[in-house]
Image (cartoon, rainbow, N blue to C red):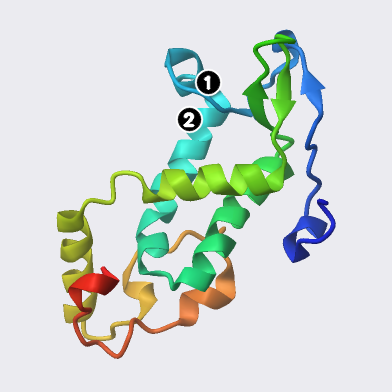
């Protein structure tokens, strides 16, 4: 079922692959809570990618949010990283595959986007003369065509849309 997504051709999904603990690499991202996963180099890199992409994600239309999430999955994969979840029964790490990884990325991108921060960002974008997305940090690794979209006509968004 990894073939049916148009983006899966760009990189391989290792869904179902199992990895013993001593074969987890610095490039892998570990699912789970706690210090072991938080301090893992792959997770630190993942969180940096997420933080850098948050402003663009926040301003993206719904259809583009998935592209942003998948581009982060793709970067980790392209560096040899896997998206691993510990199977408590076998004691092995299992790759969750690209779809599950993209869900995790989307969740991380939504985290901590408090209303105040959104409003501050929105007003800074709508008051900057050009109102184009270039006025906001747009990491080079995000889907490029999406960067061209103008923020909606410059009018302040209604509360429901924020």
In the image, is residue 96 above or below residue 153?
Answer: above
Residue 142 visible, this angle? no
In the image, is 15 to the left or to the right of 145?
Answer: right
- Real-space CA distance between mark 1 and mark 2, rounded to the nearest whole angstrom: 6 Å
How many C-alpha atoms fall within 10 Å of the one at disc 1: few (<14), some, or many (≥20)?
some
Estimate the x, y position of residue 144 in percent, counting from the top left: 57, 71
The residue that appears at 52% across and 75% down in the rendered structure is 146
Estimate the x, y position of residue 145 in percent, counting from the top left: 57, 77
Which residue is label 2 attached to? 44
Residue 56 visible, this angle? yes
Which one is in front, 134 or 57? 57
Which residue is label 1 attached to? 40
Q: Residue furthest front?
A: 89
Question: Where, quadrant-wise, is the C terminus in this rendering?
Answer: bottom left
In the image, is residue 114 above or below residue 94?
Answer: below
Total marks placed: 2
> Is disc 1 placed on a helix, strand or loop?
loop
Asked whether the beta carbons under mark 1 and mark 2 sit within 8 Å of each other, the answer is yes
Estimate the x, y position of residue 98 in percent, counting from the top left: 70, 46
| Residue 94 position by quadrant | top right
Estimate the x, y position of residue 151 in percent, counting from the top left: 34, 81
In the image, is 147 to the left or to the right of 85?
Answer: left
The residue that appears at 43% across and 43% down in the rendered structure is 108
């Amino acid at each position: 079922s990894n073939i049916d997504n148009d983006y899966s051709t760009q990189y391989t999904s290792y869904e179902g692959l199992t990895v013993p603990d001593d074969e987890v690499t610095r490039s892998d991202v570990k699912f789970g809570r706690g210090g072991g996963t938080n301090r893992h180099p792959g997770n630190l890199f993942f969180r940096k990618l997420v933080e850098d992409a948050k402003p663009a994600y926040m301003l993206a239309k719904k259809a583009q949010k998935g592209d942003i999430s998948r581009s982060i999955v793709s970067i980790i994969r392209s560096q040899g990283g896997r998206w691993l979840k510990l199977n408590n029964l076998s004691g092995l790490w299992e790759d969750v595959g690209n779809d599950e990884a993209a869900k995790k990325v989307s969740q991380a991108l939504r985290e901590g986007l408090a209303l105040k921060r959104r409003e501050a960002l929105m007003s800074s974008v709508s008051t900057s003369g050009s109102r184009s997305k270039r006025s906001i940090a747009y990491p080079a690794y995000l889907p490029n065509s999406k960067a061209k979209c103008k923020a909606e006509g410059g009018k302040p968004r209604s509360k429901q849309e924020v």
